[in-house]
């Protein structure tokens, strides 16, 4: 859940959920093929630079050639269905998993060096907490492991968990544990924070409080990379969306650009007297690809909304409360990542397209 503490002797135990020293060594494996050319990795200003990352587990290609460059100060959402390679990519980025091929650089350094220097904080799904101690005491213990660290009181306030300072870790709810993990990630005062499903187990109020705290922290120009299944969080918070499918980046850009990849619009309206015959007639209208209904409300998914709207008004003049909206992030996500969607050529990295 946070960066690797600096080395402190052979017998020193690792902090809970921290990145083990052995696992966080330089993540720059030699190519499996002798003499294979390695692409040079650029130095800062990139806070994150991944080049050609690949990882295979048995016959499963979890990550298949991921290229990603994130500039300092960017807020990036990493999206994809289960099994798309999000967590594996994050593990390789942090040095927890060694890639089969490819390179990782954080601020121009290896993950091990960047984490040891306290430049990286992480909040992972499987990060643990020290048992049977107060939150405040745990944070004080972990704070001593970093070369530069924020005061515990300040970290508690930034994470919005000041009231939990005296609470014992084994008595925290799921949402409280997540917010305490966030406090741990903030301890080293990192330049980059990596979040894997950060609001899992949080209720609506806790999620709002978390993102309020996250926005405040990021406003100072910090870099944020987060993976989430809550698409509205990505839509509201991220400057940029990176969409993975089957271990490859298939879309990379601002939210508006990703939505535009799908095309088409949705017509929502109210039409009384709906029955099977009317629904069949709506589905046959030109420009309509799909019809959904709930009570008297209808939703028409339209590749050609202008043609569909004219046909709708002509065939059903009593229709009312008409709205025409563009594709949302959820629509784009489903269209680009579903199993029955066509094969998509992996997206070029933003680094390449902006040269």
Image: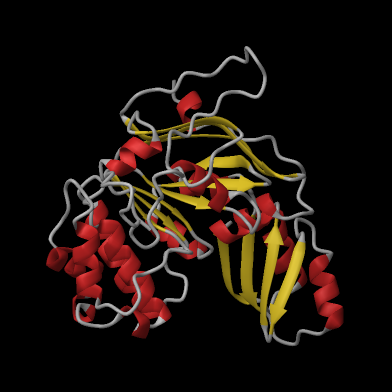
Q: Is residue 95 left or right of residue 220?
A: right
At which x and y percent is residue 129?
Answer: 36, 69
Q: In the rendered image, is residue 115 in sight?
A: yes
> Which residue lies at the image location 61% right of the left edge and 44% below the top edge?
261
Q: Is residue 50 above or below residue 203?
A: above
Q: Is residue 346 left or right of residue 2?
A: right
> Which residue lies at the image location 72% right of the left edge and 67% below the top edge?
312
- The image quarter containing residue 332 is bottom right
At which x and y percent is residue 80?
Answer: 59, 53
Q: Nearer the viewer, residue 23 or 298?
A: 23
At which x and y percent is residue 39?
Answer: 52, 19
Screen quadrant of the N terminus: bottom left
Q: Nearer the viewer, residue 186 or 298?
A: 186
- The image quarter containing residue 268 is bottom right
Q: Is residue 339 above or below residue 164?
A: above
> Which residue lies at the image location 39% right of the left edge and 77% below the top edge?
175
Q: Nearer the viewer, residue 318 or 85?
A: 85
The residue sitting at the front extreme is 11
């Amino acid at each position: 859940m946070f960066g690797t503490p600096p080395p402190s002797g052979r017998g020193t135990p690792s902090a809970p959920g921290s990145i083990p020293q052995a696992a966080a060594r330089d993540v720059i494996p030699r190519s499996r093929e002798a003499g294979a050319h390695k692409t040079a990795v650029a130095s800062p200003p990139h806070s994150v630079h991944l080049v050609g990352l690949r990882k295979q587990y048995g016959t499963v290609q979890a990550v298949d050639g991921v290229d990603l460059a994130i500039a300092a100060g960017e807020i990036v959402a990493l999206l994809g269905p289960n099994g798309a390679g999000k967590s594996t990519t994050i593990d390789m980025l942090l040095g927890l998993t060694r890639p089969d091929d490819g390179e990782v650089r954080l601020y121009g350094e290896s993950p091990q060096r960047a984490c040891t220097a306290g430049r990286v904080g992480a909040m992972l799904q499987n990060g643990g907490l020290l048992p049977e101690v107060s939150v405040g005491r745990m944070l004080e213990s972990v704070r001593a492991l970093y070369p530069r660290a924020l005061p515990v009181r300040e970290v508690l306030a930034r994470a919005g968990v000041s009231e939990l300072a005296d609470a014992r870790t084994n008595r925290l709810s799921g949402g409280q544990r997540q917010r305490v993990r966030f406090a741990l990630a903030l301890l080293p005062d990192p330049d980059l924070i990596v979040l894997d499903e950060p609001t899992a187990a949080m209720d609506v109020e806790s999620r709002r409080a978390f993102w309020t705290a996250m926005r405040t922290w990021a406003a100072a120009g910090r870099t944020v990379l987060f993976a989430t299944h809550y698409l509205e969080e990505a839509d509201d918070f991220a400057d940029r969306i990176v969409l993975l499918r089957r271990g490859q980046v298939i879309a990379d850009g601002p939210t508006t650009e990703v939505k535009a990849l799908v095309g088409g619009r949705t017509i929502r309206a109210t039409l009384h007297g709906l029955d099977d015959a009317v629904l069949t007639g709506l589905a046959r209208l030109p420009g309509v690809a799909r019809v959904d209904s709930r009570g008297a409300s209808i939703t028409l998914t339209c590749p050609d909304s202008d043609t569909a709207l004219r046909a709708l008004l002509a065939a059903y003049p009593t229709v009312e409360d008409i709205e025409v909206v563009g594709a949302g992030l959820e629509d784009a996500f489903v269209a680009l990542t579903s199993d029955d969607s066509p094969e998509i050529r992996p997206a070029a990295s933003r680094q390449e397209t902006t040269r």
